[in-house]
Image: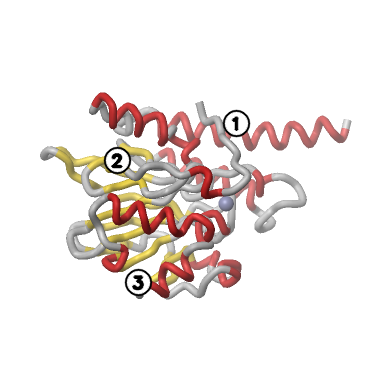
């Protein structure tokens, strides 16, 4: 579980887009996930991915029967290029409004200038969807996690993301900001309090997007509905931070 694949070029990691559940669709690639939410009054894109996969993102939206010109909002989990590189072009082409956690506002200028800065407790509303924002610093200072409800066959599901799980910036010399390790632990503690029925990862290895997508396509069984993986993933993240710290103390010995 939680294993990764690497590609020389990001576009080699193309994935056929598919509906995850309700009004939530996967439109990303193996190197970086992107999601589409159809609110009935416009589309929301969560993370745009690398610039060399923008064609795939746009193609995926068309393949699902939507138009990229209906994108109203683009929300970003954090400022890193794998989630934001394609945003400037996509926002320019569609006129969509761009959102990011306010504490990532400065660093994201490298990729685009955000229209709206989000903070703890903000709710982004569009059509039938209300996305709740939780500030979950650690991976970056302004990482945000997103929570919203979706409906399928008369059932309501809590959909949740963890906006920045990567341990790369928790290593000494790579910190996004000084207090990132305590921030990360505190974020994990608060994330554990959320009830999540459908965990959508911002990288496919977070929730085995490809494996579950394949099962959904071939058998119709929706393994994205899973009330355990959220906590399993948060535990995995906490263990990985412990391992980073442990490996540093071993090097010092
Ligand atoms: Zn990142």
- Callouts 1 and 2 close, C-beta under 8 Å: no
The CA span between labels 3 and 2 is: 24 Å
Residue 210 point in image, percent of width and height: 41, 34
- The residue identified by callout 1 is 239
- Horizontal arrangement in the rendering, residue 96 relative to residue 173 (left or right): left
The CA span between labels 1 and 2 is: 28 Å
Q: Earlier in the sequence, mark 1 or mark 2?
A: 2
The CA span between labels 1 and 3 is: 41 Å
Q: Residues within 10 Å of mark 1 (few under 14, many from 20)?
A: few
- The residue identified by callout 3 is 94
Q: Foreground mark, 1 or 3?
A: 3
State the residue at coordinates (43%, 64%).
119
Compare residues 193 and 50 and report the one nearer the observer: 50
Q: Which mark is residue 20?
A: 2
Determine the image quadrant of residue 196.
top left
Compare residues 140 and 191 and report the one nearer the observer: 140
């Amino acid at each position: 579980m939680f294993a990764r694949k690497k590609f020389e070029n990001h576009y080699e990691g193309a994935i056929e887009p598919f509906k995850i559940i309700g009004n939530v669709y996967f439109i990303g690639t193996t190197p970086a996930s992107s999601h589409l939410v159809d609110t009935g009054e416009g589309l929301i894109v969560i993370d745009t991915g690398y610039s060399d996969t923008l064609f795939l993102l746009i193609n995926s939206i068309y393949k699902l029967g939507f138009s990229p010109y209906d994108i109203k909002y683009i929300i970003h989990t954090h400022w890193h290029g794998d989630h934001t590189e394609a945003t400037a072009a996509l926002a320019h082409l569609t006129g969509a409004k761009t959102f990011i956690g306010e504490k990532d506002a400065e660093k994201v200028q490298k990729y685009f200038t955000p229209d709206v800065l989000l903070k703890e407790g903000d709710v982004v509303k569009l059509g039938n969807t209300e996305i709740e924002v939780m500030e979950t610093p650690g991976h970056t200072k302004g990482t945000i996690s997103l929570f919203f409800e979706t409906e399928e066959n008369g059932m309501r599901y809590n959909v949740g993301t963890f906006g920045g799980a990567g341990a790369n910036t928790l290593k000494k010399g790579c910190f996004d900001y000084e207090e990132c390790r305590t921030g990360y632990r505190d974020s994990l503690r608060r994330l554990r309090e959320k009830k999540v029925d459908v965990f959508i990862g911002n990288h496919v290895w977070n929730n085995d997007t490809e494996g579950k997508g394949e099962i959904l396509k071939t058998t119709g069984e929706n393994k994205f509905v899973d009330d355990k993986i959220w906590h399993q993933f948060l535990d995995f993240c906490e263990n990985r931070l412990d391992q980073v710290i442990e490996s540093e103390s071993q090097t010092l010995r």
